Image (spheres, rainbow, N blue to C red):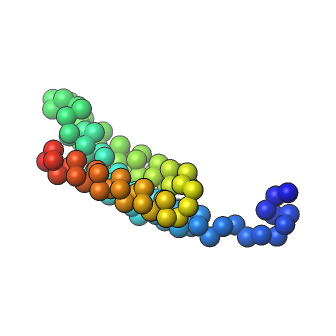
Amino acid sequence: MSRASTGQAAPRHLLFKGLTGFLLGFPLALWLSWLLTYGGLLPAYVPVRDQIAMWLAVLLWGAAPCIAFLAQSRRQCAIAFLLANAAAFAAWRVLQ
């Protein structure tokens, strides 16, 4: 039996997961973009390196809310994004 036929509303944690992915995904996307383009994976002589970093950040930020919905609970979603942000920030500080 589907949720619509029983009259139940959609779970409220969907909004939380979407906002978590949107808000915590932004700094994560920026740090991952920097790590992938300036952290040593691309040679320094690539003329479009800045453009790649810019568009990669947009793609990563767009994927973050989608990935947030894979979490089992609100707590797991928040912890996963906070840990990912902390790891990306630590790697950014080491390679800076």
Q: Which residue is pictured at 35% across the width and 43% down the height?
A: 56
* Corner quadrant of residue 38: top left
Is residue 69 shown left or right of residue 63?
right
* Corner quadrant of residue 22: bottom left
Is residue 28 shown left or right of residue 42?
right
Q: In the rendering, at what x and y percent does residue 26 appear? A: 37, 58
Q: Is residue 79 above or below residue 88?
A: below
Quadrant (top left/top right/bottom left/bottom right) for the N terminus: bottom right
Residue 9 shows in this picture? yes
Q: Nearer the viewer, residue 10 or 79?
A: 79
Q: In the rendering, at what x and y percent does residue 5 appear? A: 86, 63
Q: In the rendering, at what x and y percent does residue 55 appear? A: 35, 44
Is residue 13 shown left or right of residue 34?
right
Q: Which residue is pictured at 57% across the width and 56% down the height?
A: 72
Is residue 1 shown left or right of residue 24?
right
Q: In the rendering, at what x and y percent does residue 80 appear? A: 42, 56
Q: Nearer the viewer, residue 13 or 48?
A: 13
Residue 54 shows in this picture? no
Q: Is residue 27 above or below residue 51?
A: below
Q: Which residue is pictured at 41% across the width and 64% down the height?
A: 23
